[in-house]
Image: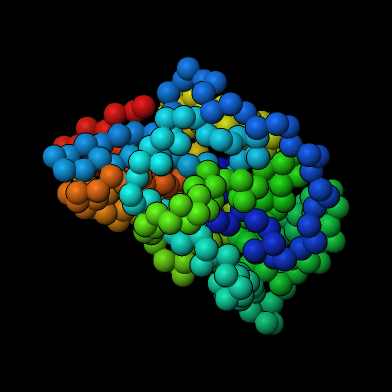
Amino acid sequence: MPAREPISGFSSPQQLSNPAPPPASPAPPAQRSSTRSPCRHLLWKLDSANATVFLLGAIHVMKPEDYPMPAAIETAFSNAAIVVFETDMARLEDPASQKELLKRGALPQDQILSEELPPSLYSRFRQQVRQLGLPPDIFDFVKPSVAAISLEALEMQRLGFSSENGVDHYLFKKAQQQHKKIETLESVDFQIRLVTRFSNREGEQLLDETLEDLAETGAFLKAMRRAWNCGDTTQLDTLLNRSRIEAPSLFRRSVRNRNKRWAPRIEQLLRSRQQAMVVVGAGHLLGKGGLLDLLRHKGWQPTQL
């Protein structure tokens, strides 16, 4: 199964390699009821003397029928004066940011992907791209890590999942429409660097693992979606944070170090006098070194709703 959840805002392959879009998915079924599940949610409440902060673990790729969300989440969002996201998703979608992403995700001018990879790995990659109905040469000039992320995103799109339907994207658009105060934990530039600054070895490893796991993407997404809908923290931590053991240096850079920078910002919100919601990728909340763990060590007592 995939070793990680897609990074916020980067699960659209057009952002990374600009290939032709995959075939259109069938029309989605009718929207679900927002009050159907007796399960808990991936939502926590923290209270201070003056403020309430809700922490929501987001899945970055979902389906249209996943909305509206459960009533507890929609209510917490409606009551929040401030909504905090990983990054500014409007800026991320801006043409200038997209141009910068494409620029940083490209190989140097004198390099080509086939020369950056072992022949057997490149052959497997070309075969998989053809199976998705795309010409492999659209990836000739992108870094291996970008090729891997794009390939995984294409498979998710084929299965009907997209970042446009991700929980964070849904709430960001809704916050804009309701004129809520929007704050961010990271700059767009930081997130672009996060997905384009893999070492050659890391990029090659990521592509190899992506190819090995691609056939299980459907099962992974189904399990992730089911666990999210019932707030199953143990299952989600297992699914989303595999790299904690399998690729510790990558996990440290992409998850743990970021959590350490974000936790003080959540504490600042708890010292304010306004109700807030913080929306981050679900994997950031869970397990050792997750935001919930860091906040508990600071004396806060988050309650799962």
At horizontal 56% and vertical 35% (from top left) the residue drawn is: 68
| Number of callouts | 0
User: Residue at the front extreme?
Assistant: 178
Instruction: State the colouring used for the structure image.
Output: rainbow
Most foreground residue, 186 or 250: 186
Above-or-below relation of 219 to 268: above
- From the viewer's perspective, tell me whether residue 140 is left or right of residue 294: right
Snapshot quadrant of residue 115: bottom right
At horizontal 62% and vertical 28% (from top left) the residue drawn is: 32
Q: Position of residue 9 (x, y in %)?
A: 55, 56
Snapshot quadrant of residue 217: top right
Most foreground residue, 266 or 237: 266
Residue 259 is at least partly visible in this image: no
Snapshot quadrant of residue 111: bottom right
Residue 142 is at least partly visible in this image: yes
Q: Position of residue 154 (x, y in %)?
A: 72, 51
Q: Position of residue 300 (x, y in %)?
A: 19, 37
User: Residue at the left extreme?
Assistant: 49
Quadrant for the C terminus, please: top left
